[in-house]
Amino acid sequence: MSRVVEGRALHLWSLHEDVTVEQGDTDDELVLRSRFGTERISAPTPVVREALRRMQLGPVLLANISTGRLPADRTGGGRAAYLVLWPMLRRLSHLIVRTLSLEDLKGPLLSVITTRQGAGFTPVGVSAQRLIRLMSDVSMTLESAGLALRSAGSAHWVQLHRPEAVWVVGLLAWPVTPSRAAAILPLPPEVTEAVLSYLIAAGMTEDC
């Protein structure tokens, strides 16, 4: 854990791998099929169509979704795209995988997958002095895509793709504050905070 990781955090969106996007009975309808059933989107805008097409292929930065009608956003936050797509993203939250990555082209850090219909996911703000640890019932299993975290009381589970995410989880075996975690780990503070934000929002931690 001596290597210092560089790169800013990127917040990516994709559809779960079991979701298919099909043309409806008319040209003015899209149909999404998944383990939760069928969702129909009437009169989808070009931006919504492009977003769903891209998200079906894999994690995307919202700021990069454009049909010529969406302003560019070089900050990586994707605020313009988020505002335009928000009604669709909120409605389909149970079909969406949220992925945290680094701008280093080495792959994602972690992904959060929803397990219950109607359960949305939104990363939360993290207080620097909030004392947290892993939930006592969190299980960690080794799967083909990495380590998986699950808690019986959570509507989500977390896939850890890279060692950097595992470093953060390892610190949560004992009570720790985000500021202390950021000081210990060889990660940019922004990245440590983002990982904690996703873990907290996914229901993997508890306050001490």
Image (cartoon, rainbow, N blue to C red):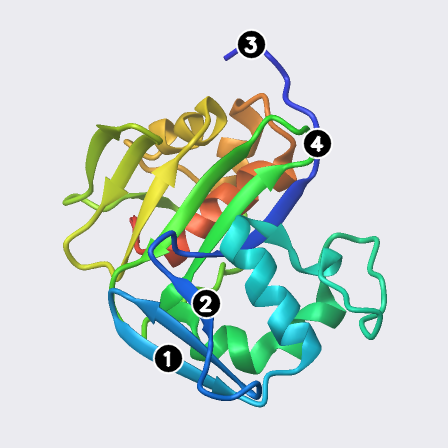
Is residue 2 shown left or right of residue 170? right
Which comes sooner in the sequence, label 4 or label 3?
Answer: 3
- Measured in 3D between alpha carbons, the distance from the residue under mark 1 to the one under mark 2, in whole angstroms, is 10 Å
**Mark 3 falls on what kind of element?**
loop
Of circles 2 and 3, the one toward us is 2
Q: Residues within 10 Å of mark 3 (few under 14, many from 20)?
A: few
Which comes sooner in the sequence, label 1 or label 3?
Answer: 3
Q: Which residue is mark 1?
A: 39
Q: Residues within 10 Å of mark 4 (few under 14, many from 20)?
A: some
Of circles 4 and 1, the one toward us is 1
Going by the numbered disc 1, the residue's amino acid type is Glu
Image: 181 above or below 202: above
Of circles 4 and 3, the one toward us is 4
Which residue occupies the foreground of this view, 44 or 119?
A: 44
- Measured in 3D between alpha carbons, the distance from the residue under mark 2 to the one under mark 3, in whole angstroms, is 44 Å
Is residue 191 shown left or right of residue 33? right
- Measured in 3D between alpha carbons, the distance from the residue under mark 4 to the one under mark 3, in whole angstroms, is 16 Å
Q: Is residue 31 visible?
A: yes
Q: Which residue is mark 2?
A: 21
Of circles 1 and 2, the one toward us is 2
Q: Quadrant of residue 36?
A: bottom left
Q: Residue at x 34, y 70 (%)?
A: 33
Q: Which residue is mark 4?
A: 7
Q: Are marks 1 and 2 in contact (CB under 8 Å)?
A: no
Q: Residues within 10 Å of mark 1 (few under 14, many from 20)?
A: some
Q: Which residue is mark 3?
A: 2
Q: Are marks 4 and 1 in contact (CB under 8 Å)?
A: no
Which comes sooner in the sequence, label 1 or label 2?
Answer: 2
Going by the numbered disc 4, the residue's amino acid type is Gly
**Mark 4 falls on what kind of element?**
loop
Which comes sooner in the sequence, label 2 or label 4?
Answer: 4
**Mark 2 falls on what kind of element?**
strand
